[in-house]
Structures are given as C-alpha cells and as structure tokens.
C-alpha cells in the first residue's frame, strides 16, 4: 500500500494529535471533539494536511484538497440562481464520471437550483465535484444529521477505495461503527474542556 500522508504527531499548546499514517484506499476519521476550539482546530489541521502550512511532523506524499463548503452569493443568486450545471462547470472536472454522479438522485437535474437542495445531497455535490478533480481529500460533514453522516461517509469510502484517500475531520463520536481507523485529539492537561 502506498503512503499518502504520515503524521508523526502534532502538538500545540492545547492539544495533541497522535501519530498516524494514511494509506491509499483508506479513510481516517480524526475525532476533534466538540467545543469552542473546533473551528480553529479544523482550519489549522486542514491547512497542514493540504500543504498550506508546513509542519515538521507531517510528510505529504500526495497533495490533498479540502472539500470546501458550498458558498453562495445572495445578491447574484437573487437574480441568477446557481444551478447544479453551473456549479459543476465551475468546480468539477466534467470529464470525470463523478461529476455526473449527483444525477443518480432522480430529482436532481442540471437545472435544479442549488438553494433548493437539502443538506446531504448538497454535501454530496461538493464531494463529487472535489473527487472528480482529485483522489485525495480532507473533508467534514458539518450540518448533516446521523443518517447524512453515514450515507456521505459510505459514498466517500466507496470512491476512495479505488486509489484515493481521505481524512474526515469530525466533532462527534458517532463514526465508531463505520470507520476502521479513528484518531482522537488528546487535550493537554491544562486545557481540557472536560
């Protein structure tokens, strides 16, 4: 198996991420726990794992991409609502079959307005667009319910088994039954919120 990312341990003033190795065909769930630190921690780690910040203990063998959130321009969408077709044209590799995978949802067409798509299919749209361009992603499942977590995770798991890799930055401990490799953030004694 080919190594995609090797983490020898990330230590900050407040927490420690234990060592792990991400292999091709694998998803690692990085359980960040919930709390006020979550947003800053996620930003910091995704920047390290995607190579935007160099860290002496993290070795990237292949570039990873963060699956960004769907963002809309309220002003522009008021007059020209963003459709699935326009979103994919801007954010996906249209030559990849993954760019068309969202249309397996029978009610989603190229002309469907994105503002009318609920949470889980909207997250799948961003995941498929990112995975159409790269095999190696860092992602989260913010704003999804338990069913949405499970469904989205299984979709990504099926896709990365074919030579990709993924790190899921997650704040709830509900992935234990789905993920084979979970790494948990460890608090430094002085900074534990518990």
Image (cartoon, rainbow, N blue to C red):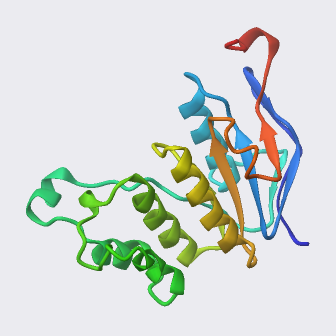
Identify the residue at image location x=86%, y=39%. 9
The quadrant in which the N terminus is found is bottom right
Give left or right: position of 33 versus 78.
right
Give coordinates of residue 61: x percent, y percent: 80, 66
Residue 174 image-quadrant placement: top right
Q: Is residue 114 left or right of residue 56?
A: left
Q: Using the rendered view, name the quadrant where residue 18 is placed.
A: top right
Point 46% across, 58% down: residue = 123
The image shows residue 127 at horizontal and vertical percentages of: 52, 65
Foreground residue, 66 or 34? 34
Which of 59/89 is in front?
A: 89
Q: Tell me if residue 79 comes above or below residue 139 in the rendering.
A: below
Which residue shows up at 70% across the image and 60% down it?
166
Q: Position of residue 82 (x, y in %)?
A: 23, 66
Q: Quadrant of the C terminus?
A: top right
Residue 89 at what x, y percent from top left? 35, 79
Residue at the limit of the structure toward the left, as seen here? 79
The residue at the far bottom in this view is 95
- Is residue 13 shown above or below 76? above
Q: Is residue 189 left or right of residue 80?
A: right
Total number of numbered labels?
0
Q: Residue at x 61, y 74 (%)?
A: 134
Image position of 45 (left or right of 24): left
């Amino acid at each position: 198996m080919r190594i995609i990312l090797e983490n020898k341990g990330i230590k900050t003033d407040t927490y420690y991420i234990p060592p792990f190795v991400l292999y091709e065909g694998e998803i690692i769930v990085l359980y960040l726990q919930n709390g006020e630190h979550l947003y800053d921690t996620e930003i910091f780690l995704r920047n390290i794992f995607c190579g935007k910040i160099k860290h002496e203990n993290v070795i990237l063998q292949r570039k990873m991409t963060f699956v960004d959130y769907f963002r809309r321009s309220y002003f522009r969408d008021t007059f020209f609502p963003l459709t699935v077709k326009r979103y994919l044209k801007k954010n996906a590799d249209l030559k990849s079959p993954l760019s068309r995978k969202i249309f397996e949802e029978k009610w989603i067409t190229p002309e469907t307005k994105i503002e009318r798509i609920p949470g889980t299919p909207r997250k799948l749209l961003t995941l498929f667009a990112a995975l159409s361009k790269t095999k190696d992603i860092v992602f989260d499942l913010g704003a999804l319910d338990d069913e949405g977590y499970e469904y989205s995770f299984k979709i990504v798991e099926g896709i990365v088994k074919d030579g990709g890799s993924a790190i899921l930055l997650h704040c709830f401990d509900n992935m234990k039954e789905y993920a084979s490799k979970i790494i948990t953030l460890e608090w430094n004694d002085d900074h534990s919120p518990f």
